[in-house]
Image: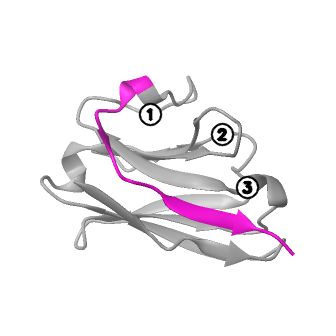
Protein backbone atom coordinates (compact mmCIF):
# COMPACT_ATOMS: atom_id res chain seq x y z
CA UNK A 1 0.00 0.00 0.00
CA UNK A 2 1.23 3.46 -0.91
CA UNK A 3 -0.01 6.63 0.76
CA UNK A 4 1.01 10.07 -0.46
CA UNK A 5 0.99 13.24 1.59
CA UNK A 6 2.42 16.73 1.54
CA UNK A 7 0.56 18.30 -1.35
CA UNK A 8 -0.88 21.79 -1.19
CA UNK A 9 -0.86 25.21 -2.75
CA UNK A 10 2.35 27.16 -3.18
CA UNK A 11 3.43 30.26 -5.03
CA UNK A 12 5.72 30.07 -8.07
CA UNK A 13 9.31 29.70 -6.94
CA UNK A 14 8.29 27.99 -3.73
CA UNK A 15 9.02 24.51 -2.42
CA UNK A 16 7.11 21.47 -1.26
CA UNK A 17 8.10 18.04 -0.08
CA UNK A 18 5.89 15.07 -0.86
CA UNK A 19 5.97 11.84 1.10
CA UNK A 20 5.06 8.32 0.02
CA UNK A 21 4.64 5.89 2.91
CA UNK A 22 5.11 2.34 1.69
CA UNK A 23 3.71 -0.63 3.58
CA UNK A 24 3.93 -4.32 2.91
CA UNK A 25 7.58 -4.64 1.94
CA UNK A 26 10.87 -2.90 2.67
CA UNK A 27 12.07 -0.33 0.18
CA UNK A 28 15.01 -2.59 -0.66
CA UNK A 29 12.51 -4.73 -2.56
CA UNK A 30 10.73 -2.07 -4.57
CA UNK A 31 11.58 0.62 -7.04
CA UNK A 32 9.43 3.62 -6.18
CA UNK A 33 8.59 6.44 -8.53
CA UNK A 34 6.65 9.66 -8.61
CA UNK A 35 4.28 10.39 -11.47
CA UNK A 36 2.01 13.34 -12.07
CA UNK A 37 -1.10 14.14 -14.04
CA UNK A 38 -1.71 17.75 -14.97
CA UNK A 39 -5.19 18.94 -15.93
CA UNK A 40 -6.04 17.78 -19.43
CA UNK A 41 -2.81 15.82 -19.82
CA UNK A 42 -1.69 12.25 -19.56
CA UNK A 43 0.11 10.96 -16.52
CA UNK A 44 3.88 11.35 -16.79
CA UNK A 45 6.82 9.97 -14.86
CA UNK A 46 8.84 12.42 -12.76
CA UNK A 47 11.45 10.64 -10.65
CA UNK A 48 12.36 7.14 -9.52
CA UNK A 49 14.58 5.54 -6.91
CA UNK A 50 15.85 2.00 -7.31
CA UNK A 51 15.31 -0.75 -4.80
CA UNK A 52 18.73 -2.19 -4.08
CA UNK A 53 21.30 0.50 -4.77
CA UNK A 54 19.13 3.59 -4.25
CA UNK A 55 20.21 5.16 -7.51
CA UNK A 56 17.83 7.72 -8.90
CA UNK A 57 16.51 8.95 -12.20
CA UNK A 58 14.54 12.12 -12.95
CA UNK A 59 13.13 13.45 -16.19
CA UNK A 60 14.85 16.43 -17.77
CA UNK A 61 12.05 18.86 -16.98
CA UNK A 62 12.55 18.49 -13.21
CA UNK A 63 16.01 17.03 -12.59
CA UNK A 64 17.54 20.37 -11.62
CA UNK A 65 14.64 21.22 -9.28
CA UNK A 66 13.26 17.98 -7.83
CA UNK A 67 15.08 15.43 -5.69
CA UNK A 68 13.83 11.95 -4.84
CA UNK A 69 15.12 10.25 -1.71
CA UNK A 70 14.15 7.56 0.75
CA UNK A 71 14.29 6.78 4.44
CA UNK A 72 14.48 3.02 4.80
CA UNK A 73 13.85 3.17 8.54
CA UNK A 74 10.53 4.92 7.90
CA UNK A 75 9.89 3.01 4.66
CA UNK A 76 9.08 6.33 3.05
CA UNK A 77 10.08 7.94 -0.23
CA UNK A 78 10.21 11.70 -0.59
CA UNK A 79 10.06 14.16 -3.45
CA UNK A 80 11.65 17.49 -2.63
CA UNK A 81 10.34 20.03 -5.13
CA UNK A 82 12.07 23.39 -5.42
CA UNK A 83 11.61 26.37 -7.74
CA UNK A 84 8.08 25.25 -8.47
CA UNK A 85 6.42 26.50 -11.63
CA UNK A 86 2.78 26.90 -12.59
CA UNK A 87 3.24 24.01 -15.01
CA UNK A 88 4.13 21.72 -12.09
CA UNK A 89 0.48 21.88 -11.01
CA UNK A 90 -0.81 18.31 -11.03
CA UNK A 91 -1.95 15.38 -8.97
CA UNK A 92 1.19 13.58 -7.87
CA UNK A 93 1.17 9.81 -7.46
CA UNK A 94 3.72 7.41 -6.11
CA UNK A 95 4.05 3.96 -7.60
CA UNK A 96 6.13 0.90 -6.90
CA UNK A 97 7.27 -2.27 -8.55
CA UNK A 98 9.39 -5.15 -7.23
CA UNK A 99 11.10 -5.93 -10.53
CA UNK A 100 11.76 -2.65 -12.28
CA UNK A 101 15.14 -0.95 -12.47
CA UNK A 102 14.70 2.73 -13.25
CA UNK A 103 17.04 4.23 -15.80
CA UNK A 104 17.25 6.89 -18.46
CA UNK A 105 15.10 4.66 -20.67
CA UNK A 106 12.20 6.57 -19.15
CA UNK A 107 9.34 6.09 -16.69
CA UNK A 108 6.16 4.43 -17.90
CA UNK A 109 3.13 3.88 -15.75
CA UNK A 110 2.47 0.43 -17.19
CA UNK A 111 5.75 -0.75 -15.59
CA UNK A 112 4.48 -0.16 -12.06
CA UNK A 113 2.14 -2.53 -10.25
CA UNK A 114 1.09 -0.59 -7.14
CA UNK A 115 -0.20 2.95 -6.91
CA UNK A 116 -1.22 5.47 -4.32
CA UNK A 117 -4.30 7.67 -4.48
CA UNK A 118 -2.44 10.87 -5.28
CA UNK A 119 -1.95 14.25 -3.70
CA UNK A 120 -2.77 17.59 -5.31
CA UNK A 121 -0.03 20.16 -5.88
CA UNK A 122 -1.15 23.59 -7.05
CA UNK A 123 1.36 26.27 -8.02
CA UNK A 124 -0.34 29.61 -8.31
CA UNK A 125 0.09 33.22 -7.33
Tell whether 24 sits left or right of 112: left
Tell whether 8 sits left or right of 123: left
The crowd level at tag 1 (other Cα within 10 Å; few <14, some 14-19, many 20+) is many
How far is the residue under mark 2 from the one under mark 3? Answer: 13 Å
Q: Nearer the viewer, mark 3 or mark 1?
A: 3
Could you say which disc has been placed on residue 102 in the image? 1
Asked which quadrant contains residue 99, the reply is top left
Which residue is pictured at 28% across the width and 33% down the height? 113
Q: Residue furthest right?
A: 125
Badge 3 marks a residue whose secondary structure is helix
How far is the residue under mark 2 from the one under mark 1? Answer: 11 Å
Q: Which residue is mark 3?
A: 88
Magenta residue check for 21: no
Give yes or no for contact between labels 2 and 3 (Cβ–Cβ under 8 Å).
no
How far is the residue under mark 3 from the one under mark 1? Answer: 22 Å
Q: Which residue is mark 2?
A: 59
Q: Nearer the viewer, residue 76 or 43?
A: 43
Q: Which residues are magenta?
A: 110-125
Tell whether 76 sits left or right of 8: left
Which residue is pictured at 37% across the width and 31% down the height? 101
Percent position of residue 119, x then y? 50, 62
Badge 1 marks a residue whose secondary structure is loop
Which residue is pictured at 56% across the width and 27% down the height? 106
Amino acid sequence: QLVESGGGKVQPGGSLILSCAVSGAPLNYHAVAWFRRAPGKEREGVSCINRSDGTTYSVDSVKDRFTISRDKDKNTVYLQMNELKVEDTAVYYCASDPMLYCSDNGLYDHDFTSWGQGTQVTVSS
